[in-house]
Image (tube, rainbow, N blue to C red):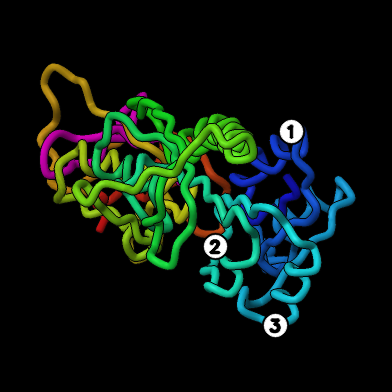
Amino acid sequence: MRLVFTGTPQTAVPALDALLASRHEVAAVVTRPDAPAGRGRKVEASPVARRAAGAGIEVLTPPRARDPEFLDRLREIAPDCCPVTAYGALLPQAALDIPPNGWVNLHFSILPAWRGAAPVQHAILHGDDVTGASTFRIVSELDAGPVYGVLTEPVRPGDTTGTLLERLSHAGAELLVATLDGIEDGTVQAVPQPAEGVSFAPKITPADARVDWKLPAPVIDRLIRACTPEPGAWTELDGARLKLGPVSPDVSAAPLDLAPGELHVGRHAVLVGTGSRPVRLGDVQAPGKRLMNASDWARGLHSGGPARFT
């Protein structure tokens, strides 16, 4: 089939690579416009745009998918189908109507669970043991279209959003190609999603990523892993924001009695009190500093009473 691939972040690049290696023709790519990125906030093309440009493929970056110029160009390209992975913007019905085989989205959850922008983050945050990916036909309602195919993936105890998305992006790329092959061959049929089991995964904001040390240790662990690498979990110490990497449980036979947020700097570990057992800090990043091991960071703390995160 003649395809127009739509996607934006690095997570979508494996899907584009898989399509480029498939029997299908990728005629063009649609991605979000250039935007500030990185610590220097330099304006850059999206990872998908850079990969497509390297492959000599036309790149379309409409500010809005409803813009008449974009819709006219899409009609000129005349795709048979438009596969989508993590585009980051809504598609109007005028665009959905153009390809005869519709727009097929690779979504990183087992639908109807975790419809929305942050399915992997919410799977970790809520303690799911298993997640996966689904391919479905896009309709006007958010992530509610009929499903072509599903794969499952266990959520490992130490998984962050970054590590889990890495696995899902590669496995999901294979699922997307298999779905398109089946659509072309007439061997797959989209099945309506069940009405039961619907849940939603809105974007997690920096405000959501602040750690409440009064919560139990397992909840804090899941929050930090869900927010790694983005938007980054954080806390405050003496009014300064501190970014936190994943923590680990304190497995001492006799855990210290620490108040929520209270720090204990030991010889080999830095512990923090929670609403249950203490947790061991991993990496931390102070304002204007590099990411470092918590023990190295703690050497720079001023003594004079117990330190406490707020």
The CA distance from mark 2 to mark 1 is 24 Å
The first of marks 3 and 1 along the sequence is 1
The first of marks 2 and 3 along the sequence is 3
Residue situated in front as seen by the camera: 294 or 182: 182
- Position of 178 with respect to 34 (left or right) is left
Residue situated in front as seen by the camera: 192 or 150: 192
In the image, farthest residue toward the right: 56
| Marks 2 and 1 in Cβ contact (< 8 Å) | no
Residue type at tag 1 = Ser
The local secondary structure at tag 2 comes to loop
Residue situated in front as seen by the camera: 262 or 235: 235
The CA distance from mark 3 to mark 1 is 31 Å
- Position of 253 with respect to 116 (left or right) is left
Tell me the residue that label 1 is attached to: 22
Tell me the residue that label 2 is attached to: 88
Residue type at tag 3 = Pro
Tell me if mark 1 has few (under 14), some (14-19) or many (20+) residues whose alpha carbon lies within 10 angstroms of its own.
Answer: some
Q: Position of residue 149 (x, y in %)?
A: 45, 36
Q: Position of residue 147 (x, y in %)?
A: 42, 44
Tell me the residue that label 3 is attached to: 68
The CA distance from mark 2 to mark 3 is 19 Å
Q: Is residue 291 above or below residue 271?
A: below
Dominant SS of magenta comes to loop
The C terminus, quarter of image:
bottom left
Q: Is residue 271 magenta?
A: yes
* Residue at 60% in and 53% down: 101
Q: Which residues are magenta?
A: 266-284
Q: Position of residue 166 (x, y in %)?
A: 54, 35
Q: Is residue 283 visible?
A: no
